[in-house]
Amino acid sequence: MKKLIMFDFSEKNAFPLLRNLLDADSSRLFHEQHEIKQAHPADILTDKLLYLNVKFQTFWKNSSLETQWDNSKNNPKGDSISDYILELDSFYDSLFLIIKCFEPPREQDNKDATRWLKGIKSVRNQKFLDSTSQSQKLFRDMANKLKHGHVSISMLTISNHKNIPVDGFYIQSIVGPNDQRGPDPDIHQLYRGAATAISYNHFALHCTA
């Protein structure tokens, strides 16, 4: 079994972003002044990180399971991948709530923080999008497929150039006539004429970075 990677989000071990939120000047915070009141931004971040950590631990633990399929479609390995991807997407959305905490109330409030920030032309929001949109594209695209498309998670194992097995997965969808299924072309780009997949190690490192 793979060793679990534990994270500590306590105030004592706060990383720079969390520390900045904990120490934020109250005069710069507007989370309780909006029509739709919000928690303190440090609490938003901590809560979402704890949820994300739980999903990651299950994802990492189940990566060592053998792939098994049965008539009940019991697939804890694939389910934990899907759950982790969706939680990553939810975590990213929560960051817009944090940005909103630093914007004073303007115009009509909206439960969708992303739309509200766009509507007020938030400079903070645009800077955040410019610096993160590319890095989050991988899991955002996969999350959208899982939420809105008829797709599933499929596992595979290949051997690298040193003949060492590498475990991974791909998003499977309908890719041709007669219910032909394969790697979703919107997620898995071609490389030397073959569709790419995602290794567990690469995905874990990419998403925790």
Image: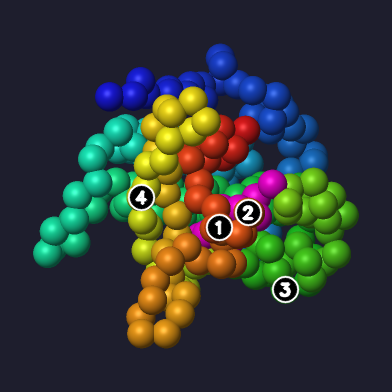
Q: Say whether residue 58 is left or right of residue 33.
A: left
Dot 3: few (<14), some (14–19), or many (≥20) neighbours within 10 Å?
A: few
Q: Is residue 141 magenta?
A: yes
Residue bearing the label numbered 2: 191
Q: Say whether residue 4 is left or right of residue 98.
A: left
Q: Tell me what residue is drawn at x 43 percent, y 22 percent.
A: 6
**3D distance between C-alphas at marks 2 and 4:** 19 Å
- Front in this rendered view, residue 30 or 81: 81
- Front in this rendered view, residue 185 or 203: 185
- Front in this rendered view, residue 60 or 120: 60
Would you say residue 43 is visible in this rendering?
no
Range covered by the magenta-colored residues: 135-143
Residue bearing the label numbered 1: 194
Q: Tell me what residue is drawn at x 76 percent, y 62 percent.
A: 117
Residue bearing the label numbered 3: 108
Which sits earlier in the primary sequence, circle 4 or circle 1? 4
Q: Quadrant location of residue 44?
A: top right
Magenta-highlighted stretch: main secondary structure? helix
- Looking at the picture, which amino acid does disc 2 mark? Tyr
Number of the front mark, 3 or 2: 2
43 vs 8: above or below: below
User: In the image, residue 143 lies at what x, y percent?
Assistant: 51, 60
- Looking at the picture, which amino acid does disc 1 mark? Ala
- Looking at the picture, which amino acid does disc 3 mark? Gln
Q: Which mark is residue 100?
A: none
21 vs 73: above or below: above
